[in-house]
Image (spheres, helix red, strand yellow):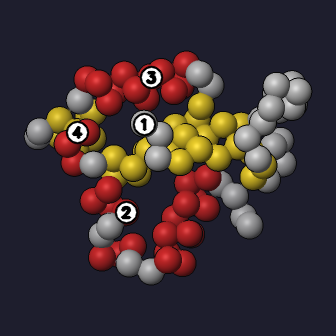
């Protein structure tokens, strides 16, 4: 399961999901995964368990840029304001708008 999918044109502007006719243009597909603690190995919060690691590899094979956001980071006390979360996503996506 993918939590969010965003498509960008060549100018890094978000666009609607591309159709067959628009696929010939340079489109960047971004999959955002919100990772729960049980996605990680028991003693290492940077290493994915097997099935979740495979999901990321499959998305990358389908030419998605995969952004991983750990749920414990997203819900931390440092991310309590909506503007903070927006700025965090903009930074991850490397967009200025």
Circle nearer the N terminus (1, 3): 1
Camera sees residue 71: yes
* First along the sequence among labels 3 and 2: 3
What is the CA distance from the residue labelled 3 to the residue labelled 2? 23 Å
Dot in front, 1 or 3? 1
Mark in front: 4 vs 1: 1
Can you tell which mark lies on residue 57? 3
Quadrant location of the N terminus in the rendered image: top left
Q: Position of residue 85 (x, y in %)?
A: 49, 69
Mark 4–mark 1 Cα distance, whole angstroms, equals: 16 Å
Q: Secondary structure at mark 3?
A: helix
Q: Is residue 20 left or right of residue 41?
A: right
- Numbered tag placed on residue 40 in the rendering: 4
Q: Residues within 10 Å of mark 3 (few under 14, many from 20)?
A: some
Res 56 quadrant in image: top left
Relative horizontal placement of residue 10, taking residue 43 as reference (left or right): right
Crowding at mark 4 (Cα within 10 Å: few <14, some 14-19, many 20+): some
- Give the quarter of the image for residue 42: top left
**Residue 4 in the image, given as x and y percentages of width and height:** 53, 48
Question: Residue 20: x and y, percent?
Answer: 82, 25
User: Which is nearer the N-term, disc 2 or disc 4?
Assistant: 4
Q: Nearer the viewer, mark 2 or mark 1?
A: 1
Q: Secondary structure at mark 1?
A: loop
Cα distance between the residues tagged 2 and 1: 18 Å
Dot placed on the residue nearer the N-terminal end, 4 or 1: 1
Are dots 2 and 1 in contact, CB under 8 Å?
no
* Quadrant holding the C terminus: bottom right
**Mark 2 or mark 1: whose residue is earlier in sequence:** 1
- Label 1 crowd (10 A; few <14 / some 14-19 / many >=20): few
Instruction: From the image, tell me which residue sits under label 1.
Output: 1
């Amino acid at each position: 399961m993918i939590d969010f999918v965003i498509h960008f044109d060549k100018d890094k502007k978000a666009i609607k999901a591309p159709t067959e006719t628009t696929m010939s243009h340079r489109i960047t597909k971004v999959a955002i995964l919100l990772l729960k603690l049980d996605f990680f190995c028991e003693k290492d919060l940077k290493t994915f368990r097997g099935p979740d690691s495979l999901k990321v590899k499959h998305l990358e094979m389908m030419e998605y840029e995969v952004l991983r956001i750990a749920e414990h980071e997203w819900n931390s006390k440092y991310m309590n304001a909506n503007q903070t979360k927006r700025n965090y996503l903009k930074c991850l996506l490397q967009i200025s708008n």
